[in-house]
Amino acid sequence: MPVITILRLKADPKTVEETASAHAETMTQIAEAGKAAGATRHTFAGRDGEVLVIDEWPDEATFQEFFDSQPDIPRIMQAAGVDGPPEISFYRKLDTPDQF
């Protein structure tokens, strides 16, 4: 059953964007590995002092296996000044007729 995965990061959105741009090749490699592992959606959103990473995965276990196997993710987070580990939440994707 598909899940929406949300990682909540304590970080400055502008710094995250700048770090992502500076490490564009690594970010793209992580994204491609995520697609290969089963992710179907991936985006970032931010506001003052907080960044969300919003993904769609086949299930929680697939996400967790991917996340735990990626040594570049914690390195990028550290470079972006993320304060502490992410808060990870999983939500069941609902089947509604108004999706797009």
Image (cartoon, rainbow, N blue to C red):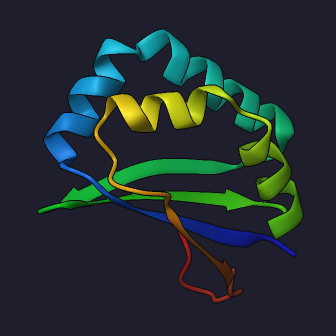
Q: Can see residue 33? A: yes
Q: Nearer the viewer, residue 77 or 48?
A: 77
Q: Is residue 76 left or right of residue 80?
A: right
- Residue 11 point in image, percent of width and height: 26, 52
Q: Is residue 15 above or below residue 41?
A: above
At x 31%, y 56%, the residue is: 45
Q: Is residue 90 above or below residue 45?
A: below
Q: Is residue 17 left or right of residue 97?
A: left
At x 34%, y 47%, the residue is: 82
Q: Nearer the viewer, residue 84 or 99?
A: 84
At x 35%, y 26%, the residue is: 20
At x 51%, y 24%, the residue is: 27
- Residue 69 point in image, percent of width and height: 80, 37
Q: Nearer the viewer, residue 99 or 48?
A: 48
- Residue 77 point in image, percent of width and height: 43, 38
Write down the quadrant of residue 17 in the picture: top left
Write down the quadrant of residue 3 in the picture: bottom right
Q: Quadrant of the N terminus?
A: bottom right
Q: Is residue 65 left or right of residue 50?
A: right
- Residue 25 point in image, percent of width and height: 50, 10
Q: Can see residue 59? A: no
